[in-house]
Image: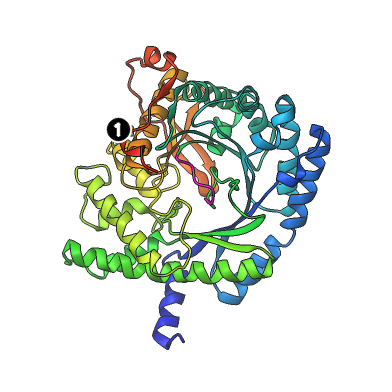
Amino acid sequence: MFNTGEVLETINMIEREHLDIRTVTMGISLLPCMSGTAEKTAKAVYDTVCKKAENIVKVTSELSREYGIPIVNKRVSVTPAAVICAPFASKAHIIGKALDDAAKNLGIDFLGGYSALVHKGMADYEKEFIMTIPQVLAETDRLCSSVNVGSSKSGINMDAVSLMGEIIKQTAQKTADRDGFGCAKLVVFCNAVEDNPFMAGAFHGIGESGTVINVGVSGPGVVQHALESVPDANLTDLAETIKRTAFKITRAGQLIAREAAKRLNAEFGIVDLSLAPTPARGDSVAQILEEMGLESVGTHGTTACLAMLNDAVKKGGVMASSRVGGLSGAFIPVSEDIGMIEAAERGGLCIDKLEAMTAVCSVGLDMIAVPGDTPASTISAIIADEAAIGMINNKTTAVRIIPAPNKKVGDSVNFGGLLGRAPIMPVHKESAAKFISRGGLIPAPIHSNKN
């Protein structure tokens, strides 16, 4: 039973502190849709997604009204499309179009899973599939794509890393009229997880059951407000405050996840314990770090603050939910966090510092805009660095980077909504082309040799 104080506290979190359920994502297996031709498979894919998720918008809207908790996004993730398209990889765009059409028919904001898993090797059909990504992202509106290029168990597939630098550049060029917007729907992973509810990297893992509900919670503003109430606390007490707050946030997510799964005739998968910011002031991970005692995010001490925040969020959330998964941590997407945006604009936050921060948080270099003339080999090298952090530390890392066509340092891109705006950040001018061109596989670390 909730007492009056707890009810009022929850209302305050929602109305003043930006508490919300960031996404309810339905994962759908498309393996039964595989047929002899791309056209037949596309029809089966469209019909399956529309049937399984036909009530997701209706049910989540009902839950939001009944419980008074905003549910910001309604999404779908599907089996990695490279698997479904294996017999006809050159026609994968037909499947991509069917998925995008299904998303529009359902009225959801994004559909994830135009994806390939090539962390140990890249079959001919997988490479052919990956080559379709730029055109498909340019021709669709709600479809998201991801490619997993490494893992702690297998190492890093540098041939795939090299290819993805080219793919990102092509995607930017094909969406140049929108400042390279296609790249905002494309993620390159190391150690990708099968139950991630967040876009653009969500896909429905092969090991998952047929239909699953995964929920991503969020509440940077709630955490910031809690820290404001203990301005002179030591770091131990600060961590305890974050844990207690994360517990409350996660309980809301657990409630919505279970009820949504029941009403949508799906299994309850996981609650993702992430602090996902928005461009709104008061809903920022960067501002939490500054509340902890930093004059500005990006200065010395930022990585330590973020490590403590991430750990406390996970500890508090795990106690509140029977099933925790996804990415779970604090996201630091530059364009989607007002504190990150402002720090980058004044030069206090650089890519190198962000890279260090990704060693202790979720998920990686996210929504970063760089000059349009950045070489593909440099983008590949950025991906390789981030994958190395993930591989060595046995954690998920990712890169979502936008080489904005015709933009240079000092300019910015503005995608609007939750995707926000991003200043163009400088990259190192020195070349890594020879390193990237070597190809092959960076071997897995010695600590991966356990079974």
- Residue drawn at the location 38% of the way across and 27% of the way down: 443
Of the pair 86 and 106, the residue shown nearer to us: 86
Image position, residue 59 (x, y; %) = 68, 67
The image quarter containing residue 335 is: top left
Per the picture, the main secondary structure of the magenta-coloured stretch is: loop
Of the pair 444 and 397, the residue shown nearer to us: 444
Residue reaching furthest front?
451
Residue 300 lies in magenta, yes or no? no
Image position, residue 107 (x, y; %) = 71, 53
Q: Quadrant of the C terminus?
A: top left
Q: How many marks?
A: 1
Q: Looking at the picture, does residue 432 appear above or below residue 270?
A: above
Q: Looking at the picture, does residue 79 appear above or below residue 52?
A: above
Of the pair 431 and 173, the residue shown nearer to us: 431
Q: Is residue 319 left or right of residue 236?
A: right
Label 1 Cα neighbours within 10 Å, binned few <14 / some 14-19 / many ≥20: few
The reply to whether residue 345 is in sight is no
- Give the residue at mark 1: 352
Q: Is residue 367 left or right of residue 287?
A: right
- Residue drawn at the location 72% of the way across and 24% of the way down: 90
Residue 195 lies in magenta, yes or no? yes
Image position, residue 247 (x, y; %) = 38, 69
User: Mark 1 falls on what kind of element?
Assistant: helix
The image quarter containing residue 237 is: bottom left
What span is colored magenta in the figure? 191-196
Q: Is residue 95 left or right of residue 19?
A: right
| Residue type at numbered disc 1 | Asp
The image quarter containing residue 127 is: top right
Q: Looking at the picture, does residue 376 appear above or below residue 272?
A: above
Q: Looking at the picture, does residue 96 appear above or below residue 441?
A: below
